[in-house]
């Protein structure tokens, strides 16, 4: 029984280490901001919706450009490195984290993520 306890503790330690590693990796790549700060950055930045087109057309933040996360790598040229990039999806998840890391790796330095994504957005939206 004691051996099983050690195995479970090792697994839990591994999971916690992985979560911590991802947390600090994301913090180096982008700044996660709340609604008010995100809204204040929209006019000066490039607002990117990382969801698929069908979700984007159903509802998106007013002024957003749809670049699905699966197509971001091929569309990096559509974004300017000298302007802030504002990223969001439905809720803050893996897509937005991977997008921020990809942008950072490709020389973008001013990257913001909407905390809790479109699900928590209090500003203007466009719906179909």
Image: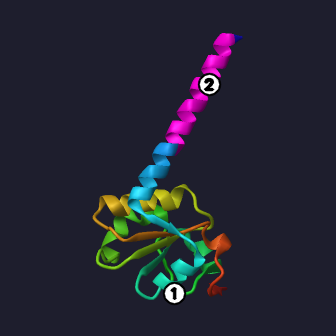
**Magenta stretch bounds:** 2-19
Mark nearest the camera among 1 and 2 is: 2
Tell me where residue 39 sits by quadrant. bottom right
Horizontal relation, residue 6 to residue 46: left or right = right
Are there few (<14), some (14-19), or many (20+) residues within 10 Å of tag 1? some
Q: Main secondary structure of the magenta part?
A: helix
Q: Is residue 8 magenta?
A: yes
Q: Position of residue 45 (x, y in %)?
A: 41, 82
Q: Is residue 69 above or below residue 67?
A: above
Residue 89 highlighted magenta (yes or no): no
- Marks 1 and 2, how far apart in space? 48 Å
Q: Earlier in the sequence, mark 1 or mark 2?
A: 2
On residue 4, the disc is: none
Residue 101 spot, x, y in % from top left: 40, 57
Answer left or right for 37 relative to 126. Answer: left
The residue pinned by badge 2 equals 9
Disc 1 designates what residue? 63
Please name the residue shown 32% across and 68% down the image: 108
Residue 20 point in image, percent of width and height: 50, 44
> Could you tell me which quadrant the C terminus lies in?
bottom right
Give the SS element for disc 1.
loop
User: Residue at image x 66%, y 81%?
Assistant: 122
Mark 2 burial class by Cα count in 10 Å: few <14, some 14-19, many 20+: few
Q: Could you tell me which residue is drawn at 64 percent across and 11 percent down?
A: 3
Hey, which residue is sitting farthest right in the picture?
A: 1
SS for tag 2?
A: helix
């Amino acid at each position: 029984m004691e051996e099983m306890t050690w195995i479970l503790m090792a697994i839990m330690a591994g999971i916690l280490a992985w979560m911590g590693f991802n947390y600090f990796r994301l913090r180096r790549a982008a700044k996660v901001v709340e609604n008010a700060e995100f809204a204040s950055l929209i006019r000066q930045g490039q607002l990117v919706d990382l969801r698929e087109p069908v979700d984007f057309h159903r509802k998106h933040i007013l002024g957003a450009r749809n670049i699905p996360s699966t197509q971001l790598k091929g569309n990096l040229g559509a974004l300017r490195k000298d302007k802030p990039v504002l990223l969001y999806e439905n809720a803050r998840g893996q897509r937005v984290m991977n997008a921020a890391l990809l942008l950072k790796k490709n020389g973008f330095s001013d990257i913001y993520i909407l905390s809790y994504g479109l699900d928590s957005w209090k500003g203007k939206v466009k719906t179909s």
